[in-house]
Amino acid sequence: MLQASLLIFARMRRQNISIISRTLLWLAYLLADYIAVYILGHMSLCGKSHGHQQLMAFWALFLLVHLGGQDNITAYSIQDSQLWLRHLLSFVPQTVGVAYVLYKYVAGSWTLVTAAVLIFVSGVLKYGERVWALNSSSLHNLSKFIDSRKLSEAKREPRA
């Protein structure tokens, strides 16, 4: 539900909205990751009956895709881009956690492994893309990009 609300209301953060709306959007942005991490931890500790095991494995895979976040709100503000290293450090254990849950609930049953591997790879790519986007949009990288664009434009201008 949080990801759906972020998808719908992400553009609002760039507009002049009330402090209550801005705070609710910010909380949804933060809670989306925290809830996914909590559920993933709960899945790795709790066991279910055999009938629920494969379903649990797929939920873990979708949580990894979920942690990749929305494309239209990779960061809530430009200052969040400075936290890309924190996202990188959380990317590794969360990916390992999903792999553990997948192993725990699918071990011995190879019927859905192909689909599980495809979703796992897409989740790793999606979450990795988020970390890369945060790193690429840091203030230092943005200023380097703008300077390189100005330099290339200056070289293209005809000299009088």
Image (cartoon, rainbow, N blue to C red):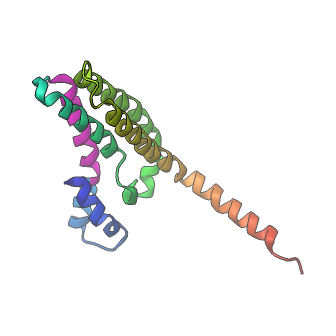
Residue 139 location (% of width, % of height): 54, 54
Point 24% across, 71% down: residue: 18
Q: Is residue 120 above or below residue 30?
A: above
Q: Quadrant of the N terminus?
A: bottom left
Residue 26 location (% of width, % of height): 28, 56
Relative to residue 53, is residue 78 drawn left or right? right
Q: Is residue 109 above or below residue 90?
A: above
Q: In this view, does 118 lie above or below 47?
A: below
Relative to residue 121, is residue 35 drawn left or right? left
Between 55 and 76, the one lying in front of the other is 55
Task: Find out whether residue 33 is within the magenta segment.
Answer: yes
Is residue 29 at all visible to an observer of this figure? yes
- The residues colored magenta run 29-46
- Res 86 quadrant in image: top left
Between 113 and 35, the one lying in front of the other is 113
Point 22% across, 60% down: residue: 24
Point 80% across, 71% down: residue: 156
* Majority secondary structure of magenta residues: helix
Relative to residue 47, is residue 67 drawn left or right? right
- Res 70 quadrant in image: bottom left
Residue 80 location (% of width, % of height): 42, 51
Residue 48 location (% of width, % of height): 11, 25
